[in-house]
Image (spheres, coloured by chain):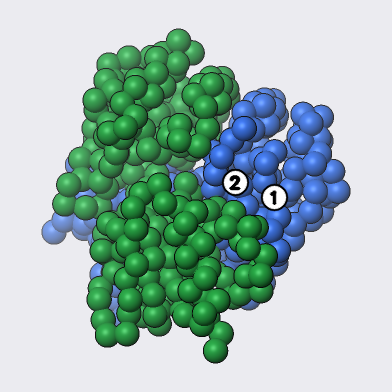
Chain colours: A blue, B green
Amino acid sequence: MTGSLTIAGLGPGDEALVTPEVTAALATATDILGYAPYVARVAPREGLTFHPSDNRMELQRAAHALRLASEGRNVVLVSSGDSGIFAMASAVFEALEETPQYQGLPIRVLPGVTAMLAAAARAGAPLGHDFCAINLSDNLKSWAVIEKRLRLAAEADFAIAMYNPRSASRLEGFGRALSVLKEAGCGDRLVIFARAVSTPDERIEMIKLSEALPEMADMRTLVIIGNSATRRVGRWVYAPRHAR
Amino acid sequence: MTGSLTIAGLGPGDEALVTPEVTAALATATDILGYAPYVARVAPREGLTFHPSDNRMELQRAAHALRLASEGRNVVLVSSGDSGIFAMASAVFEALEETPQYQGLPIRVLPGVTAMLAAAARAGAPLGHDFCAINLSDNLKSWAVIEKRLRLAAEADFAIAMYNPRSASRLEGFGRALSVLKEAGCGDRLVIFARAVSTPDERIEMIKLSEALPEMADMRTLVIIGNSATRRVGRWVYAPRHAR
């Protein structure tokens, strides 16, 4: 009996944004692992076991998923968005390095609609020109690294998608990020606050960076900073395709 | 009779990566516009008119889509991948700026699985840490801008997803991009060449940047340059979640 591990992104929230590939993987799974709110998005059925876990348990969860697969289970490890973007896929490969006996297991990574794509689509096309994506959580890297990247991203004139701008345990970082960008001359750039996109709690706000306040973001918000050419047309915001 | 314009991403190729939201939009469309190979991915049916067009006709195509919607048609403008990432959404908003009489039309942008997400999933998790996405086509910006961004991206230690690395009319640029990155000290970084991901022509290659050759990419290739910590485990490549 050969088990398998599928690492799947459930998209930002709306079931209409879950790919058929992921839906098919969920339909043949025996075990679902993931952060509890994401596991709760999978419909229960007979023969399907849920293993919800807490936030910040990524490595333990990944090791658990590998062990279950090695025991013959068909495991799906779920993330929101895309599991390769600041989510569970990297944690699985870290765990796999520590447990080489599992490297022969059938493992698949299934892509999904990551939060910045859904947020950008609601706002218009702010990622239509070169851009970067930065995880503002300082659980896994120092603020010095984050600030350096923000300064270089401003100099490169990238649009900037900010994941995890703020959480209950990290109140100050996002304010510092806004300050760094103001100092880098980005005060006139447009900022999009996209909260809980594609869920009933969705809220989209657009404002100039110089007027943005840290409390406009929370843990369910994806922030997109426009590049220097990003502009409004009607209710939309977009990055022109040309660079000067 | 009110028409509408839906700007939809079809994903990288496999029908199992088309979101149900996009499938539903296609099912109620009266007109499909897009670059011919993408229009060809939509199944014909009675009452559905196809308007395929050539590459590099983005603005004309966008204006055509707006005009048809204003005439009461339910238009879907298709891109591959995600229409907001180096695709048609920005062109539509540019066209909308030139034709303000259409700004009241119902317009929706539907996200999709963009090429870098599908490529990353096949390779492992090379975008699991901070990264940037750069369009290497110099149709719309100068090589000086592209080179500056590559140097800053290397300094920021971003992974780099390169869209449109090479085409029949642009043979030299990708070689220059590799040279810029070698000069920036990225010779030891891992490079993923992901060609035609999720289609029958899919081919994934991984190699050190110092050994990469321009001819390893063509117009159907998405290139991902790892960051300085990106590593192999078994047949996979991933970016660790931590930064030093």
Residue B240 position within the rendered picture, expressed as x and y whole percent measured from the top left: 46, 33
Residue beneath the point at 43% across and 65% down: B77
Residue beneath the point at 34% across and 39% down: B222
Q: Is residue A178 above or below residue A6?
A: above
Mark 1 / mark 2, whichever is N-terminal: 1
Quarter where residue B48 is shown = bottom left
Q: What amino acid is at disc 2?
A: Pro
Mark 1 vs 2: CB contact within 8 A: yes
Quarter where residue A16 is shown = bottom left
Residue highlighted by disc 1: A231
Q: Is residue B155 above or below residue A179?
A: above
Q: What amino acid is at disc 1?
A: Arg
Q: Chain of mark 2?
A: A
Q: Is residue B68 above or below residue A56?
A: below
Look at the numbered disc 2 and give the secondary structure of its residue: loop
Is B117 placed left or right of A158 in the picture? left
The answer to which of A178 and A232 lies nearer the viewer is: A232
Look at the numbered disc 1 and give the secondary structure of its residue: strand
Quarter where residue B39 is shown = bottom left
Q: Is residue B126 above or below residue B157?
A: below
Is B84 placed left or right of B216 in the picture? right
Q: How many marks?
A: 2
Residue highlighted by disc 2: A240
Residue placed furthest toward the bottom = B1
